[in-house]
Amino acid sequence: MADVMSMEDIRTEASRLNIDLSAVDWNSVWVPPGEDFGIKSDDEDLNEEDSLEFDAGFGNIIVVDNLPVVPREKFEKLEGVVRKIYSQIGEIKENGLWMPVEEETGKTRGYCFIEYNTPQEAELAKEKTNGYKLDRAHIFSVNIFDEIEKFMRVPDEWAPPESKPYTSGENLQHWLTDEKGRDQFVIRAGSDTEVLWNDARQVKADPVYKRPFWTESFVQWSPLGTYLATVHRQGAAVWGGASTFNRLMRYAHPQVKLIDFSPGEKYLVTYSSHEPSNPRDSHRVVLNIFDVRTSKVMRDFKGSADEFAFGGTGGFSGVSWPVFRWGGGKEDKYFARLGKNVISVYETETFSLIDKKSIKVENVTDFCWSPADPIFALFVPEQGGGNQPARVSLFQIPSKAELRQKNLFSVSDCKMYWQSEGEYLAVKVDRYTKTKKSTYTGFELFRIKERDIPIEVFELENKNDKIIAFAWEPKGHRFAIIHGDNPRPDISFYSMKGGKVSKLTTLKQKQANALFWSPGGRFVILAGLKGFNGQLEFFNVDELETMATAEHFMATDIEWDPTGRYVATSVTSVHEMENGFNIWSFNGKLLYRILKDHFFQFLWRPRPPSFLSPEKEEEILKNLKKYSKKYDVEDQDISLLLSEQDREKRKQLKEEWSEWVNQWKKYHQHDKMEREMLRDGEASDVEEEYEAKQVEVEELVDVSEEVVADA
């Protein structure tokens, strides 16, 4: 066996040979069969237990039982019937249909084996034909061949399961108890994934956990920050803790491409799509809904990509993502999906349709849940050339009662925006002008918490302005709009207070095309991304003043931390230069910058909602000076420490400079004799003592011979 090298040894050797490991195509590296050279795969432990879940064996073969038992002369007819039924579902391999026959009687045994090209086609065949009624006496029973093997391994005699002693796990909320009140974030760069503390007071990122090849595509925090999810070929996994990040659970779903948590972290939705063997067929889609804590599949959904493509595109193969949208706040009671002329709403107690039927809404194209209540808004476009107007409707769940409806005329497009606490709904409506040659934009503003849900029609002063961006203030009553023409549009702020929309201010000709409100409201970043090369303006909406302007050249992403104290701007590998991220204070001061080659992701770790009541939070705000004394002392100590560190750094630089000067003085003294020789014995190095001498030099320029004729 070869000598074992640790990953640290490999990195050291790669550095010595000037090899960039992040640029190595690891999929092209092969080792001899059965040899791992002492390096354990990050995914190896996924196969240590429950290996049946990942068995690749005979998943593309189905067993069809309860076929008619027929003599030899009727064999071909029965085989033709079975082949006709199952070849409609997928392509049967050559010699892929086998119907066993009794040797003594020559009759069939009442079952057959069918081999498809892919396991997905076999799954579809089972789904479509299990329970298929050939005639009164023959109802098909269909199973995957691997499942039969699994059942055959079940012991004949029952044995009680072994009881394992209870071991307490790590407190998954321990990171929230950090004495410094810091927040964590995760980054992906090259092959490494790192979790770090944002230690803004020390002006640095403090490492927590680092792991190479932790995921095969991306990582994702759960909505309350309890789990970090990774994606692998075999499925998804979640990890947790303050510093150790042990794997807590895994979810078997081969070739998973996308994942999505429910708002309360109780459920995880996984998605995969598979190419059909027949190019004319649609992609095959598999969706699983797992219980996060137990990894049990609560419900699965399978079908063609066309069945899940309603409501726009955002996933793979034209499938809208997320397919299931969660409602009902953080309780995870309901989820829904958009279908053709229906909205299917499920409840998580039984994972079945509410009242066992979907809500029929002809030509519905979009819907979205309130972030706080079991209410959703839907949009139906115009029909019949404008004879039937477009409409927006609000529905209450589980009663399915329509709370409010608004008809809209001459509509070309519509988008819906909920305020974070579900108090307001803004419907942006693009309408055709009378000539139908152009459009203009207006807003329908719903006050959800008020009696009868009043609606206010709102338009900009220049209703022909193009709307570039719209965003509600989180936990607030204000909203902001970027409107006008590039490259310098205007930005207007409005308030919903007082029962009507009132304008606060308009900022003229700003280099911005995106809005990023602080999670706590009040502050907003006006950002110019993409074509604007990362222009940033930190704006205080309470005071209606700009706190700072800055630039993060080529910035692609901006994300506030969950407390609203800090902001991260990043340049991902979309650009080949300046990859990395900057951390800013809420008022636009650059705190520190970290460059990372092949930088892919930056995600703050979310925080769960506070357990304090609004009254208690208000009391703390009133007495903030009393509570802040302790932290003011700490801040002063840190400031003194940073000043001392700064002084030490300057002192060190001065000492290094003095040492460098003294070193060259020594060299100068050492070479004194040589300088004297070069100056013809002159001993002085002082420039003023030099005597300028004028030296005449004769130089022969040219020599030529000329023959002169005799006179």
Image (tube, rainbow, N blue to C red):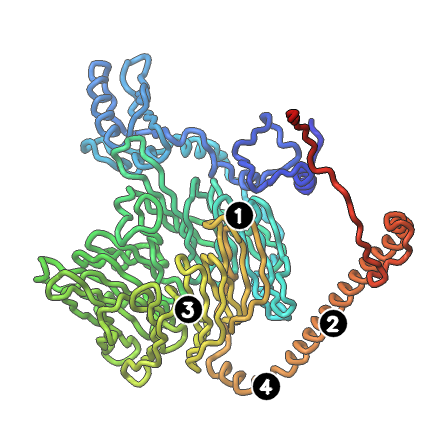
Marks 1 and 4: CB-CB under 8 Å?
no
Check disc 2 and give the amino acid type. Glu
Badge 1 marks a residue whose secondary structure is loop
Q: Are marks 2 and 1 in contact (CB under 8 Å)?
A: no
Q: Which residue is mark 4?
A: 625
- Asked whether 483 or 205 is in front, the reply is 483
Work out how far the residue at label 2 is from the one at label 4, CA to CA, in angstroms: 27 Å
Judge whether residue 395 can be spotted in this image: no
Task: Let me know if residue 113 appears in the view.
Answer: yes
From the viewer's perspective, is the residue at label 1 or at label 4 nearer?
1
**Which of the two discs, 2 and 4, labels the residue nearer the N terminus?**
4
Please give the name of the residue rendered at 16% of the width and 67% of the height, measured from the top-left corner.
408
Q: Which residue is mark 3?
A: 526
Tag 2–tag 3 contact (CB < 8 Å): no
Q: Is residue 618 above or below residue 589?
A: below
Q: Specify the amino acid type for callout 1.
A: His
Circle 3: element type: strand
Task: Give the residue displayed 22% in from the left and 17% down from the top.
Answer: 76
* Residue at (65, 32) in percent of width and height: 37
Q: Secondary structure at mark 4?
A: helix
In x, y percent, where is residue 347? 33, 59
- The answer to which of marks 3 and 1 sits earlier in the sequence is 3
Q: Which mark is residue 644?
A: 2
Measuring from the top left, give residue 429's x and y in whole percent. 22, 66
Give the alpha-carbon distance from disc 4 to disc 3, as whole Å. Answer: 31 Å
Name which residue type carries label 4.
Answer: Lys
